[in-house]
Amino acid sequence: MKNFLRVYGAPIAIVVLGLVVAFMFMAPAPPKRIVIAGGGAGGAYAATADAYAKTLGGFDVAVEVLETAGSVDNLARVKSGQADVGIVQTGLASDLGQDGVRSLGAAFYEPLWVFHRRDIRVEGLRDVEGRRVAIGPEGSGVRVLATLLLTEAGAAPESYTAVPLAGQAAAAALQAGEIDIAIVVSGPTAPWLPGLAGDPDINLLSMREAHALARRHPYLDEVMLYRGVLDLEAILPREDVMLIAPAAQIVVREDLHPAIQSLLIEAALAAHGGGSLLSDPGHFPASQLSDIAISDEASRYYENGPSFLRRVFPYSVANFLERAWVLAIPLVTLMIPLIRAAPPLYRWRIRRKIYVWYNDLRDLEAAGRAATSAEDRMEVRAKLADLQEETGKVEVPVSYTDDLYRLRAHIRFVAELVDRSSAQERHARI
């Protein structure tokens, strides 16, 4: 170990220093806490946000779910930075913009349901004229979508009475006769849907223009509500019903860490990948239907799935390696020449030390030859003894032992040379 450190200690120190410097420039770690704008309490968005929060909690990412007014509010909060993630109905970006946000894809269908009282003839969207119509409160996603589709169908906003009700409130008002038509956007599992669909005084409009609407608006899709899918025992609905459906999409700040984006897609897969009453297994999450640009990370995920490291290692380890791998090339580039240079450098250090002693030895030999008195020769002899003792304490690898012993022999040779000079001087005096 001592010899190893002598050879590779300096390269190791340089590499460690390089790692420290590299870590300073490494991509930042993903946040440990995010905020999701989830919608009204008890709604599908809030339930979805809670499901995502549970999944992310398993990866030590704390999630705060905000109660909001719905899609429009959610998108506004993400754009303003009040939330990192929002569940947003597709179709809003054209009015509200998408600056500063990206989509991770659509998560589930949210059909547009058009319920009307049976005693009112409604065969299409234009038949809302002159009626009291619940189209959601101002600022809600359903109001934006309903207003757009009604206007396209030829029903101008002033041709009907818009009532700011949605969901359960709109269903109750319709059953009470307070409104004539309820246009709502909701998932098929809403608790009030079976009661409304089973009410003999209420009809559900089958959207014959669904295919045309899906072609006109890429964020809409035509979905079939099959006979009995809401309640098989009561056979609700009584017949297959064609619906037009936007989707709930996952919208994030465009600078949200890619690792968190991947976790959110995994959470969406866990929550929606098994299919629903309106979609087949594996249909969601999907990059289709989103009207906000898909993030780079989401595009990569949909094309290739989880990264190789994510499939092999736990989330935290994979994330660290994914951030650190970009440092591998410069570090390897640094390590290879250092490792190759270490043995020659070590040999040079050892031999340099021996060569320095040879310089001292040469000076002592010259001093010994030039000495004219016994005192001078004794001083040189003492220095040679010190040099002999110093070299005797040195430890070198076996491969350099011959150089060290050769130095010691040469020291002994010079010492004998000085001793012979002293002996010759004594004989000359006799």
Image: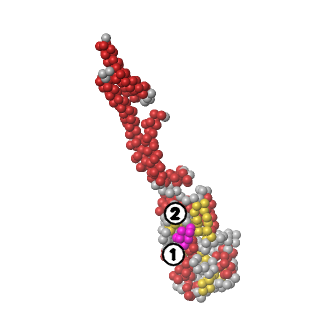
| Residue bearing the label numbered 1 | 96
Horizontal and vertical percent position of residue 44 = 62, 69
| Figure quadrant of the C terminus | top left
Q: Quadrant of residue 74?
A: bottom right
Q: What type is the residue that disc 2 sits on?
A: Leu
Locate residue 105 relative to residue 391 in the image: left or right.
right
Residue 36 seen by the camera: yes
Q: What type is the residue that disc 1 sits on?
A: Leu
Identify the residue at image location x=53%, y=78%. Answer: 209
What segment carries the magenta color? 75-83
- Say if 1 sits above or below 282 in the image: above
Identify the residue at image location x=52%, y=52%. Answer: 320
Locate residue 62 relative to residue 408 in the image: left or right.
right
Identify the residue at image location x=44%, y=29%. Answer: 395
Of badges 2 and 1, nearer the viewer stands 2
Question: Is most of the magenta stretch helix, strand or loop?
Answer: helix
| Disc 1: CA contacts within 10 A as few (<14), some (14-19) or many (>=20) | few
First-in-chain label (2 vs 1):
1
Q: Is residue 125 magenta?
A: no
Horizontal and vertical percent position of residue 107 = 56, 66
Locate residue 363 relative to residue 38 in the image: left or right.
left
Horizontal and vertical percent position of residue 90 = 53, 72
- Say if 93 sits above or below 163 in the image: above
| Residue bearing the label numbered 2 | 256
- Say if 337 sits above or below 381 in the image: below
| Disc 2: CA contacts within 10 A as few (<14), some (14-19) or many (>=20) | some
Q: Nearer the viewer, residue 143 or 388?
A: 388
| Alpha-carbon span between mark 2 and mark 1 | 20 Å
Horizontal and vertical percent position of residue 406 = 36, 24
Q: Nearer the viewer, residue 229 or 291?
A: 291
